[in-house]
Amino acid sequence: MKILLTGGCGFIGSAVVRHIIRSTNHSVLNVDKMTYAASEEALEDVGSDSRYAFLKADIADGTAMNKAFESFQPDAVMHLAAESHVDRSIDGPGQFIQTNIVGTFTLLEAARKYWLSLGKEAQKRFRFHHISTDEVFGALDVNDPPFTETTPYDPRSPYSASKAGSDHLVSAWFHTYGFPAFITNTTNNYGIWHFPEKLIPLVTINAIEGKPLPVYGNGTNMRDWLFVLDHAEALVKAVEIGEPGETYAIGARQPRTNLEVVKTICSILDELAPSAKGKHDSLIEFVTDRPGHDFRYEIDPQRAEKALDWKAKHNFEAGIRKTVQWYLDHKDWWQKIREKNYKGQRLGTTK
Ligand code: NAD
Ligand code: DAU
């Protein structure tokens, strides 16, 4: 299969590209604008493979997208490109609207134009796989059942509203034009090559450097954590067998409070990289909460597990151990980001 994949230099996109090149026969055209969140290094191992090609372009550039479809002639699209950080969406929602909504619309139109040019059989086989988030379903309370494919949309941050907007466009293109698109909505990912603005890489790096570990509010907010390499496998299965018009809710059944997450990272570091200054959890600092902070996300993945014949292989403790070790082994990568790109300062306070 020839897959036009957007956002392949990002955290999840790069895991998908590596998985495709290492473990399948598919070929990939990676379309990425190379924003602050992109990393060329994440694809160093597979970048020279003859089944991999790269195009630096903005998904909101219709002319560039039309050209990409005409020249690559894909059998499927995996659309991951997005602005992805909630805190940045609070500081500057405009880019989230532009990429996540206008960009998705532009990509959908380029894909539909190309799809209409195909013969009947190729049209039937073609898939547009939109990668989305469980944040579009809003926030759960402690005793609410987890989200499923039928949970109503209730986005609350500029990020999740922009992703909800993109999901609605994808589903409208299916219903209105018969365009063979489907959506996966997934819980929080963590793992290797994760840009250090998100909780797990930020806290891991700060702890390694002996800096404060900022926990928003009282640390009782919960997320359901999926190891990124498990997610990459699920996404590739989905593009291979996903049905038009469907939604697949993907999760790991690994809910943890933020404080549990941070304390687990600290105790792994106490073991792998003990500090002369004492236990790493003494660095924890409770800081002003995120505005509109969603209390809890969790997915019931039963239906998707069955439909995709997939299950997450890593529980949180196994995945986080690999992740912390990886950050210890890849200081060059994140130190460069900390020097040039993002120093780890607090974002999204509305101040
Ligand atoms: P990321 O921020 O790490 O990477 C995004 C990538 O998209 C970067 O390489 C960036 O350069 C590229 N990009 C951004 N704007 C672009 C544009 N206009 N044109 C082309 N490329 C552009 O994001 P991620 O965490 O890897 O998330 C990937 C996708 O998965 C997103 O759609 C996100 O909403 C979704 N998602 C993420 C998570 C998570 O926990 N990270 C969970 C569920 C769903
Ligand atoms: O649920 C899927 C979503 O998960 C994805 O769609 C998003 O792209 C992804 O960024 C992630 O969103 P979150 O807001 O849940 O992730 P983040 O790592 O920013 O925060 C996780 C939790 O940790 C959240 O409750 C806020 C809290 N937090 C975050 C940071 C950065 C802290 O307590 N301290 C921090 O420094």
Image (cartoon, grey):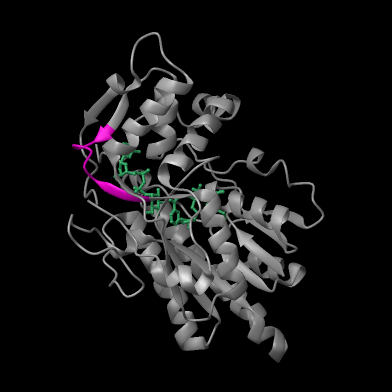
Residue 61 appears anywhere in the view? no
Q: Which residues are magenta?
A: 215-224
* Residue name at image x 47 percent, y 74 percent: 170
In this view, the residue farthest toward the top is 276
The answer to whether 70 is drawn above or below residue 186 in the figure is below
On the image, the x and y values in percent for residue 288 come to 20, 34
Note whether residue 341 is visible.
Answer: yes
Q: Is residue 54 above or below residue 269?
A: below
Q: Is 237 situated above or below 297?
A: below
Residue that appears at 39% across and 17% down: 210
Is 181 situated above or below 81?
Answer: below
Residue 223 part of the magenta segment: yes
Describe residue 128's horizontal placement relative to residue 102 as left or right.
right
The extreme right residue here reads 50
Looking at the picture, tell me which residue is in the foreground, 89 or 273.
273
Where residue 293 appears, as percent x and y from the top left, is: 23, 48
Q: Quadrant of the N terminus?
A: bottom right
Q: Nearer the viewer, residue 314 or 64?
A: 314
Q: Is 240 left, or right, of 278 in this rendering?
A: right
Spot occupied by residue 302 in the image (x, y as percentages of width and height): 40, 69
- Quadrant where the image shows the C terminus: top left
| Residue 97 drawn in magenta | no
The image shows a total of numbered marks equal to: 0
The residue at the point 46 percent across, 31 percent down is 342
Tell me if 270 is positioned left or right of 309 in this view: left
Q: Nearer the viewer, residue 291 or 300?
A: 300
**Residue 53, x across and y down, in percent:** 75, 55
Q: Which residue is painted at 42% across and 29% down in the image?
A: 204
Tell me where residue 96 sits by quadrant. bottom left
- Side of 9 where 167 appears, left or right: left
